[in-house]
Image: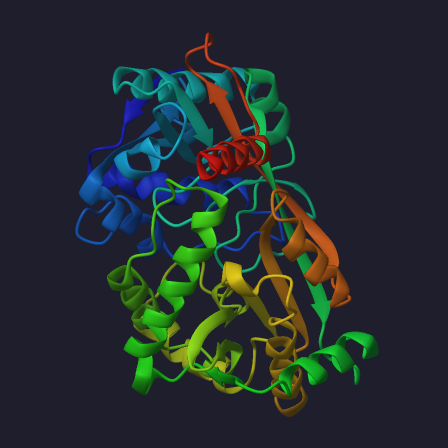
Amino acid sequence: MKITEVATTAQKREFINFPKRLYRDDPNWVCPLDSEIEAVFDPEKNYALSHGVATRWLLLDDEGKTLGRVAAFVDEVRSKANRQPTGGLGFFEVTESREAAFMLFDTARQWLADKGMKAMDGPINLGDNDNHWGLLVEGFMQPGFGMPYNKKYYRSFFEGYGFKTYFEQYSYHKDVASVEVFPERFRKIAEWIAKRPGYNYRHFDFGKRDEFIADMVEIYNETWRVFKEDFTPLDPARLRHTLQQAKAFIDPELIWFAYHNDKPVAFFILFPDLNQILRHFNGRLTLWNMIRFVWYKMTHEITRARGLVAGVHPSYQNSGIESPIFLELFHVFRRKRFYREMELSWVGDFNPKMISIYEALGASRAKTHLTMRYMIDESLPFIMYKDEMKENMAQRQVRVKE
């Protein structure tokens, strides 16, 4: 077997095409757009490469047949947000060969070690964690757009190599086609909270997108500052770019904000599940497929919405402020009957409050992904993310007392 770094146009094409052959007989797999994968490694399209570096490899057998692929990357901002310099491994695909898998892991590990990294997270993305992030271990069904899908045998390769679970990611599913979308008790509480003076709720409007983006950034950054002091703040420019790219399929009535005395205090973002259309395209967005896209959208091929991200300002957590947002969604689903399912993905095992909300909605846990960590420097301790959070909170309380 031989490892080859991807450099030529032909190698880039093979990096994209290998999974199409690997999953050819798997009806659940949805091929991501070729352009989407290639954009991850394009400095002009991936903001993370302005403060990072990435490379990728193919693993070939003696006859030149591809056995696997992998990418490794260093995001300087994300790396510094960890206890030790930490790089990433992603876009891992391999035939059912432990030897081949370990050779790919070895290659990524050595490259990261040469860059000064002390730990390796995977499988993750070079960029935002709402796409291509995590190893699927439970719920092998058709994935929502951006959610990873992989072979069942990958878990044994990661664990056999020495990766440990850094945190678990849960995806909840909820049937929204029934008459009562949400439990009666939840709905009554939401109606009561919605009537409190000073509160109002608005859905996204592209005509006022800069205002909504500013509100989202404010809530998100305040929320995550509680979880992790050295987190990476949400960048308005990147968010604006993401919304512009998704404009063709976004439903503004699936994006809601809560305000108290005009102060933004909570938001919840759902996107129509683009994978229900992309499954027809085999990764290629040709002119004909663009025409088909419009047709599929008009005929409501998309029946599922995926919850991408939510945030509640720390000052308003445990107030139930998010409940009326779901009440507004209840009214949307009653009017737009073509929506039949809502996927809430993903929520980390370190976020019990959000897990409780999803379960109160009557949603069921459908999928589990793992973000895993390998300690390149074996002298350093491995600590799960939720334990890091507890330590950070304790240290913060000590500083406040001082």
Q: Is residue 4 above or below residue 147?
A: above
Q: Is residue 232 above or below residue 285?
A: above
Left or right relative to 383: residue 192:
right
Q: Residue furthest bottom?
A: 335
Locate residue 5: give its quadrant. Answer: top left
Query: Where does the image place residue 302, in percent across and percent down from the top left?
Result: 56, 75
Which colour assignment does the render follow? rainbow
Q: Is residue 239 left or right of residue 304?
A: left
Give the residue at x 37% y 22%. Answer: 108
Residue 70 seen in the figure: no
Q: Residue at x 57, y 51 (%)?
A: 29
Image position of 344 with respect to 98: above or below: below
- Given the current orientation, which residue lies at the most extreme right position? 184
Residue at screen point 17% across, 52% down: 44
Q: What is the tally of numbered marks visible in this picture?
A: 0
Could you say which is closer to the camera, residue 289 or residue 319?
319
Tell me residue 88's x, y (percent): 39, 32
Seen from the viewer's position, the closer of residues 158 and 238 is: 238
Q: Name, please, the residue furthest toward the front.
A: 402
Q: Residue 4 in the image: x percent, y percent?
A: 29, 23
Answer with the quarter of the image where residue 338 lies: bottom right
Query: Going by the image, does 329 lie left or right of 397?
Result: right
Q: Quadrant of residue 301?
A: bottom right
Q: Position of residue 94 (x, y in %)?
A: 50, 30
Q: Residue at x 28, y 40 (%)?
A: 12
Asked whether residue 119 is in view, the answer is yes
Judged left or right of residue 112, residue 200 is right
Question: Which residue is at the front of the view, 399 or 343?
Answer: 399
Q: Which quarter of the figure is the C terminus placed in?
A: top left
Which quarter of the rendering shows the N terminus?
Answer: top left
